[in-house]
Every structure is written in structure tokens, then in C-alpha cells.
Image (cartoon, helix red, strand yellow):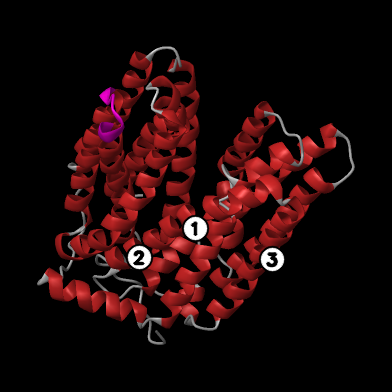
């Protein structure tokens, strides 16, 4: 791991640590501490998604033209301003404006950091680099949430102001760290407007990338989009899960990722990417079946709780398998100089899934328990089907990257062999 990659991973950990400080407590802060009500708090969460959907198409174009580092620095400053202003905002309008800044900055960080990882990695090291990124993100979120939970006091707005100030400081510290990163020489596509239009047309003409985006939507919709909405509502309403047990389930998910990430990496990095994703669909189908037992079975409350916690742990196992698989595949599908565009497009798909997932899953999980489980078990099996179909569109090197020659790629480039 080179010096640039080490700094990028430090940056990932710092950004996740800052987000972990505030994200779990955002609803409580807006609705109760600031006294703005549940509707305003719900709008704040929606603003995060809307801001991401607005800025991501432009972020990809900017990364293609300027490179990922300047775009990342701009995103970090924007997010820091949003976090700081959110900590002192007292009106609904101020809270919504601040949330839009924070949401936009957070959204742009993802494809910018992912493109920097692509720039500084080779075909042999890329899977491990993205696995390390995912590991540090989950560790940072967990540690940040744990420390933040001990600092907040719902009777004191000042404690939340401190939390948001720490989050802003993390973003600014990350900006300072990133300025020390020396990126490899990167080709740039000049004439950004024309390049932007052409790149979107080119992306939509890439059949494998389009299929991967469809698969990505189902992945995020059926897993991440349900964690804190439909699945938690189902657990409380159908399985009688307590709030403490729900917290334990979320902790089990993070613990599984942290413990299993590199053991899983050794298993998946020499296997076809499409088959790894297909296996994740089967694992998640088992997870939904276990969740069905928790809420619809006739076992004891202890058995239901154990099954529910196991569901989150199985999801974590699948996530650990995906982290060294999907993000490197996005990079390898991108033509030279276009990794930023492809990363932004995939991030856009993720945000759409995270916006639609809770809206669909929340009401289903809370009231229609059996249809909810059946529907998402079918979605998980659909992941397996889509992954097998995607494998037919990939070249041998894209599906089995270890077959390609090892080399540090130029920005946006993917390892290219004679059969690509």
C-alpha cells in the first residue's frame, strides 16, 4: 500500500467517523431538541436524498474534467459548512438549507474517493483496497456512533452543537490530509460540457454497466434500504423486538463486517465476481427466511430475538462479500478517464434505491408482515438471477481480474487485456 492509498484510507475512516457522530441522532435533534416536529425531521432526511440526486450527475462530469481530488476538497468544505450550520440552526428553513449542503457534500465524497482508489490501485490490489475502504467506513461509523451516543443529551441543544462541530472538524481535517496526497498522473477530458453529454450516452450504451446499475439498485433496495425502515419496523411489530435488541442487531451487522471482511476477501478475490454476487443473493434470501421465522414463527421471544439478530449478521456477511467485488467492477467497466463518471452514476443508483427502499419497505414491514418477507426474499433471489445474467456480459478479465496484467492504471482506466 503506497503513501497515497494510506492517506485515502485515513480519509475514509475520518469521514465515516464524522458521519457516525451525527446521522443516528439527526431525527431526534430536529424533531425534539430543536422542537421542529416529526414532519420537519422527515423532510430533512428527504433533503439528504434529494440533494444527492441533484449533485451526483454533475459530480461525475467534474471528476472527469478536474480530477477527483479538487472535487473531493470542494465536497468536504461544503459538508463542513452544512454540518456547522446544522448545529446552530434554529428554524425549519435554516435546518433544511444546512441539511442540503451536508447531503450534497456527503454524496460527492463517495465517487471522488472511489475514483482516487482506482487511480492508486492495480488490478491485483483493487479488491483489497475497496475491502479496506468498506472495513474502515463501518469501523468509523460504529466508533463515531458509540462516542456520539455518550456525548449527546436530548435536554441540551449545546451537546448536539458540539457533535456537529466535531463532524465539521473531521471533514476539514480530512481536507487537510487529502491536500498531502500525490496522485498518479491522470489524463483529463477537456471540454467538460461536451464530454459530460457524450460520457452519459456512452455509459448508457455500455450494456454491462446498465445491467450492473439495475443489479445495484436491487442490492441497495433489498438490503441497505430496509435496515432502519422496513426491517426494523417488521422486527418491532411482528417479532416484538425491543429497541435494545434492535441496537444489538445493528451492532451484529457491523461486527460481522469488521470480523469477517478480510477472511471473506481471501475467499472471494480468486472467484468470478458475478458468482460472488449471485452467492450474496442466496445468503440474503436465507437472511429473509430467518427474519420470517422471527416474526411469523411460533417460537419463544428469545428465539425470535436470536433469529432477528442473525438476520442482520447474515446481511453483514453478504456486504463483506460485495465490498471487494462491486466497486472494483464499476471501475473495470469504465473506459480510460471515465471512472469518475461511472462511480457517480453508480452512486446515483444507490441513492435512488436508498430513497425508494424505506418508502416502500416501511409501510409493508409495519403492517403486511408475510407479504413483506416474501417480497424481499424474491428480491434477493432476483439478485442471484441478475448476477448470473451480468456474468454473460462481462469479459473474462472483468469477471476474473486476476487474469489481467497487474499495472497501476491512469485515472478512470481499467486493466485492459487483449480480449476486452
Label 1 residue SS: loop
Q: Quadrant of residue 189?
A: bottom left
Mark number, residue 413: none
Q: How far from the left and from the top, in percent, is residue 227?
A: 58, 45
Identify the magenta region. Answer: 88-94
Q: Quadrant of the C terminus?
A: bottom left
Closer to the camera: disc 3 or disc 1?
3
Q: How far from the left and from the top, in percent, is residue 242?
A: 70, 29
Label 2 residue SS: helix
- 90 drawn magenta: yes
Q: How far from the left and from the top, in percent, is residue 2?
A: 31, 49
Q: Quadrant of residue 210?
A: bottom left
Residue at the top extreme of this rendering: 155
Nearest the viewer among 326 and 411 is 326
Q: Residue at x 78, y 44 (%)?
A: 295
Q: CA distance from mark 3 to mark 1?
A: 25 Å
Give the labeled residue for mark 3.
378
Q: How far from the left and from the top, in percent, is residue 116?
A: 29, 55
Nearest the viewer among 330 and 418 is 330
Q: CA distance from mark 1 to mark 2?
A: 19 Å
The residue carrying pointer 1 sits among few (fewer than 14), some (14 to 19) or many (20 or more) residues within 10 Å by Cα, namely: many
Q: Are marks 3 and 2 in contact (CB under 8 Å)?
A: no
Give the labeled residue for mark 1.
324
Q: Residue at x 35, y 38 (%)?
A: 15
Tell me: residue 218, above or below residue 161: below
Nearest the viewer among 305 and 420 is 305
Give the labeled residue for mark 2.
345
Amino acid at each position: 500500500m503506497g503513501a497515497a492509498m494510506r492517506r485515502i484510507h485515513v480519509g475514509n475512516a475520518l469521514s465515516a467517523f464524522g458521519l457516525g457522530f451525527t446521522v443516528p441522532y439527526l431525527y431526534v435533534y430536529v424533531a425534539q431538541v430543536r422542537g421542529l416536529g416529526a414532519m420537519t425531521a422527515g423532510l430533512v432526511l428527504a433533503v439528504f436524498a434529494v440533494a444527492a440526486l441533484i449533485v451526483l450527475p454533475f459530480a461525475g462530469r467534474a471528476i472527469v474534467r478536474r480530477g477527483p481530488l479538487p472535487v473531493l476538497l470542494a465536497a468536504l468544505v461544503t459538508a463542513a459548512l452544512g454540518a456547522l450550520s446544522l448545529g446552530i440552526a434554529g428554524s425549519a428553513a435554516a435546518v433544511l438549507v444546512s441539511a442540503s449542503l451536508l447531503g450534497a457534500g456527503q454524496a460527492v465524497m463517495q465517487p471522488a474517493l472511489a475514483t482516487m482508489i482506482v487511480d492508486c490501485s492495480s488490478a491485483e490490489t483493487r479488491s483489497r483496497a475497496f475491502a479496506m475502504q468498506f472495513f474502515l467506513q463501518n469501523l468509523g461509523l460504529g466508533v463515531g456512533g458509540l462516542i456520539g451516543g455518550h456525548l449527546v443529551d436530548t435536554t441540551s441543544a449545546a451537546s448536539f452543537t458540539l457533535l456537529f462541530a466535531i463532524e465539521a472538524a473531521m471533514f476539514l481535517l480530512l481536507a487537510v490530509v487529502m491536500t498531502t496526497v500525490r496522485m498518479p498522473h491522470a489524463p483529463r477530458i477537456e471540454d467538460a460540457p461536451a464530454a459530460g453529454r457524450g460520457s452519459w450516452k456512452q455509459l448508457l450504451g455500455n450494456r454491462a454497466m446498465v445491467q450492473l446499475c439495475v443489479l445495484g439498485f436491487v442490492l441497495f433496495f433489498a438490503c441497505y434500504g430496509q435496515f432502519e425502515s422496513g426491517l426494523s419496523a417488521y422486527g418491532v411489530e411482528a417479532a416484538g423486538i425491543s429497541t435494545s435488541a434492535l441496537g444489538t442487531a445493528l451492532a451484529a451487522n457491523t461486527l460481522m463486517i469488521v470480523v469477517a471482511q478480510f477472511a471473506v476477501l481471501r475467499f472471494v478475490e480468486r472467484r468470478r465476481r458475478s458468482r460472488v454476487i449471485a452467492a450474496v443473493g442466496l445468503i440474503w434470501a436465507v437472511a429473509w427466511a430467518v427474519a420470517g421465522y422471527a416474526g411469523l414463527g411460533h417460537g419463544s421471544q428469545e428465539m425470535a430475538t436470536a433469529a432477528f439478530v442473525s438476520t442482520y449478521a447474515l446481511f453483514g456477511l453478504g456486504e463483506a462479500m460485495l465490498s471487494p467485488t462491486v466497486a472494483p467492477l464499476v471501475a473495470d467497466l469504465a473506459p480510460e478517464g471515465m471512472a469518475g463518471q461511472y462511480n457517480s452514476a453508480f452512486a446515483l443508483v444507490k441513492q435512488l434505491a436508498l430513497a425508494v427502499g424505506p418508502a416502500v419497505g416501511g409501510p409493508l414491514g409495519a403492517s403486511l408482515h408475510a407479504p413483506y418477507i416474501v417480497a424481499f426474499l424474491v428480491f434477493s433471489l432476483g439478485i442471484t438471477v441478475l448476477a448470473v445474467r451480468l456474468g454473460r456480459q462481462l469479459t473474462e478479465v472483468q469477471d476474473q481480474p486476476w487474469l489481467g496484467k497487474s499495472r497501476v492504471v491512469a485515472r478512470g482506466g481499467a486493466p485492459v487485456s487483449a480480449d476486452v
